[in-house]
Image (cartoon, rainbow, N blue to C red):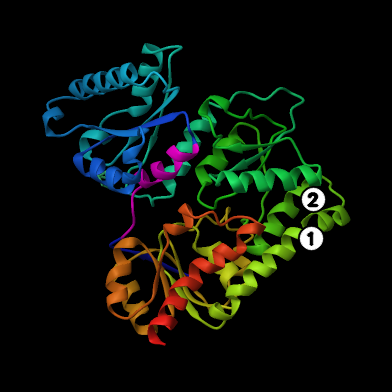
Amino acid sequence: MLQEHGQREVFCGLAAIVWLHRKIQDAFFLVVGSRTCAHLIQSAAGVMIFAEPRFATAILDERDLAGLADCHDELDRVVAQLLARRPDIGTLFLVGSCPSEVLRLDLDKAAERLSAAHQGRVRVLSFSGSGLDTTFTQGEDTCLEALVANLPAAPADDSAWLVVGTLAETIEDQFARLFAELGIGPVRFLPPRRAADLPPVGPRTRFLLAQPYLGATARALIARGATHVPALFPLGIEGTREWLRAAAVAAGVDMDRFERVIAAPVARAEQGLARYRDWLAGKRISFLPDSQLEIPVARFLSRECGMEPIEIGVPYLDRQAMAGELPLVPDRVRLVEGQDLDTQLDRVRAARPDLTVCGLGLANPLEAEGLRTKWSIELVFTPIQGFDQVGDLAELFARPLIRQARLVA
Ligand code: SF4
């Protein structure tokens, strides 16, 4: 495995607000940042322009550099204005960013102060979306970590399960049905659809990670007494089967029952996958480090679709989260942690893979050089987990290859 340090090309954690605000429907995200942050969040989430948005930016620019007290006063004023205008806000997240004037603010303290000032009216929490040393999916990790600190304590006899990581509601519903058919439950989801419905946590809580970029959240849950049930991530037939099987084994579910319950969804998944497998088999693929989903996605593409990963880049390697996935990475693949953009691009140009998975900013230049690309951010905006989405996951990667074949024909 190679470790690289150098220029990085990734979105910052503010991008996570785009999917978090859709998921947690009674929460408001107030970015405490600069005009750059405001531009990013408005262009990334601009599709919400027709709805009453549930995100905004409190811009703390040079005008506030005179003193920290000014920044706090400014923040208090913006929050008071916002709450007066939006009585529907039940949970307010202050989202930190990386400009120096914001880094000097203690947003945890500000959240405590504002919670006390608006007691009974709104719960104020804070997390960091700073782009200094994170990748965009870590915005969800820091947000859920903040939520974990506020989860109610579970009653002593509550032995519920938690599925941790944002999933599309249709996928949550599919998983909830499968858990119920397996006799595993109650199963709750973090984040919840409403921040007012935070699931309880305690020493008898067991949790499964649905997303691979939630190391800080997992550690916070363990610190609250919960037990992590390690598993592959629920991507592809193998990943979903092993993810559910880990829960079934921990819950003592009879394996004949397990096979019976998953038989029909697996058959549907195989059908969905069959439509795209021929397009993908034998094609070479490289991953530039971006979403933290690279390793489980590469596992699916190589083991179930017959693709040949050449290089898998990850922003950082969480060995604990990846413990089940790493042994399934093919031996010949170059695994790279971190980013040195120019050298990685040189390797892509030299290898000329059939498909390169990368961030938005790199896709167009690579396409201009005749290289086919897939935006990695689509992996967090597209429902891809679970058996019924296996065909859609394969299609994401087949689509650029099909388009190219049509253009050539
Ligand atoms: Fe840019 Fe930092 Fe704001 Fe992200 S948090 S938009 S990286 S200034």
Residue 142: where, in percent of width, then height?
A: 44, 40
Q: How many marks?
A: 2
Residue that mark 2 sits on:
249
- In front of the other: label 1 or label 2? 1
Image-quadrant location for residue 343: bottom left
- Give me the residue at 42% from left, 76% from top: 403
As for residue 19 lying within the magenta part, the answer is yes
Is residue 357 rendered to the left or right of residue 78? right
Asked if labels 2 and 1 touch by Cβ distance under 8 angstroms, the answer is no
Quick check: 64 above or below 272?
above
As for residue 400 lying within the magenta part, the answer is no
Residue that mark 1 sits on:
263
Type of secondary structure dominating the magenta stretch: helix
Q: Residues within 10 Å of mark 1 (few under 14, many from 20)?
A: few
> Which amino acid is tagged 1?
Ala
Residue 224: where, in percent of width, then height?
A: 61, 31
Is residue 401 rendered to the left or right of residue 103? right
- Give me the residue at 36% from left, 17% from top: 113
Q: Which mark is residue 99?
A: none
**Distance of mark 1 from mark 2, alpha carbons?**
17 Å
Q: Farthest bottom residue?
A: 409
The magenta region covers 9-23
> Which amino acid is tagged 2?
Val
Residue 178: where, in percent of width, then height?
A: 74, 48
Q: Answer yes or no: is residue 209 visible.
A: no
Q: Residues within 10 Å of mark 2 (few under 14, many from 20)?
A: few
